[in-house]
Amino acid sequence: MEEPAVALVGAGQMGGALVRGWLAAIRRGGGLTLTVVEPNFDPALQRELEAAGALLNPAGGEVADVVVLAVKPQAFAEIAAGAKRFIGPQTLVLSVMAGVTIASISRTLETDRVVRAMPNTPGQIGHGVTAFVAAAACTGPDRDLAAQLLEPLGVVESIPNERLMDVVTAVSGSGPAYVFLLAEFLAAAAEAEGLDRDIAARLARQTVAGAGALMLETGESASNLRKQVTSPGGTTQAALDVLQAADGLGPVMRRAVSAAAQRSRELGRDAESQT
Ligand SMILES: NC(=O)c1ccc[n+]([C@@H]2O[C@H](COP(=O)([O-])OP(=O)(O)OC[C@H]3O[C@@H](n4cnc5c(N)ncnc54)[C@H](OP(=O)(O)O)[C@@H]3O)[C@@H](O)[C@H]2O)c1
């Protein structure tokens, strides 16, 4: 599609990150026609959108090629009627709403061309990972377009089956919280070993951030990078002996991810029973 007409509903954290990326693509010469519906625009974003000729909060609305839904899941029912004006038989609906199933979106918006995506918070700075799944009615070009529109959030991965969205939610959706917790526990351990609280927090924070950046920039696997800082009989090895023990981090992470996936399934069932 040369210049897809995109209607975005909800320009908060995620929608804002998406639309900022699309604006950058427009400035590089990429074609997109933009309509954005948002009750409380960030003023800077609003100015950028106006400068790019985007249509903001139109009273009416023309059918779009893609409608992107980036409101909170609980706002979906409220925005549905308004979003329908942008949807025609050829429109692709791309949702980043956590936990709202393809079936529920299809039923509510009366369309079967739906892509459901799960981003994560680093997407707000373009370093996220977003997994998406497309309904059976979507074409190859639909999937390509959805992937392209999600790129401003970072890496995009396609998954084959919507049931796996619960696992995606547990791994990459919730995953940033696990990493932040690691930084918190590392800081607490540093403090317990005698460091001042502030320096402990700074050392832990930068260690987690720096290790993530090293993984990204080198493209090396996590296990290779770990081996590079581990000399036999050394200090890192002493810590890893604890972390990799039978009752160490491995089984704890396995239980944590399993609990999150289970909760995602439960929330999905609750949401389905309410629609
Ligand atoms: N943030 C994440 O890391 C993350 C990760 C995975 C999935 N998601 C999903 O992404 C979606 C958006 O999350 P978010 O963090 O970006 O939330 P957010 O910052 O609250 O953004 C939602 C935006 O939609 C706006 N909105 C509310 N009612 C509207 C309406 N009737 N018409 C148009 N816009 C309306 C909100 O405006 P008001 O502020 O005025 O209400 C807000 O600006 C959610 O469904 C969430 O599940 C987010």
Image (cartoon, helix red, strand yellow):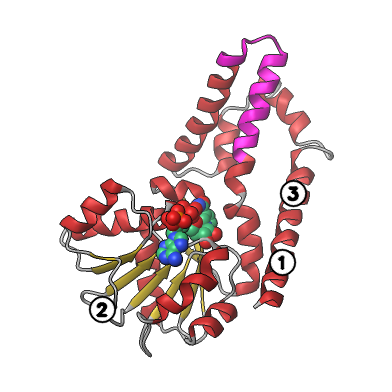
| Quarter the N terminus occupies | bottom left
Q: Which residue of the protein is positioned furthest toward the right in this rendering?
A: 247
Could you say whether the residue bearing mark 1 is in a helix, strand or loop?
helix
- Residue 125 image position (x, y, % from top left): 40, 45
Q: Which residue of the protein is positioned furthest toward the bottom in this rendering?
A: 89
Specify the principal SS of the magenta part.
Answer: helix
Which comes sooner in the sequence, label 3 or label 1? 3
What residue did someone put label 3 on? 256
Can you say whether 7 is above or below 71 in the image? below
Distance from mark 2 CB to nearest ligand 1 atom below 8 Å: no
Q: Residues within 10 Å of mark 2 (few under 14, many from 20)?
A: few
Q: Amino acid at mark 2?
A: Met
Can you say whether 57 is above or below 89 in the image? above
Q: Which residue of the protein is positioned furthest toward the front in this rendering?
A: 59
Residue under the point 55% across and 85% down: 107
- Residue 22 image position (x, y, % from top left): 28, 59
What residue did someone put label 1 on? 265
Real-space Cα separation, disc 2 to disc 3, in angstroms: 42 Å
Q: Nearer the viewer, residue 243 or 274?
A: 274
| Quarter the C terminus occupies | bottom right
Can you say whether 81 is above or below 206 in the image? below
Residue under the point 45% across and 79% down: 81
Point out which mark residue 1 bears: 2
Magenta region: 179-199
Quarter of the rendering containing residue 18: bottom left
Could you say whether the residue bearing mark 2 is in a helix, strand or loop?
loop
3 vs 1, front mark: 1
Q: Nearer the viewer, residue 40 or 16?
A: 40
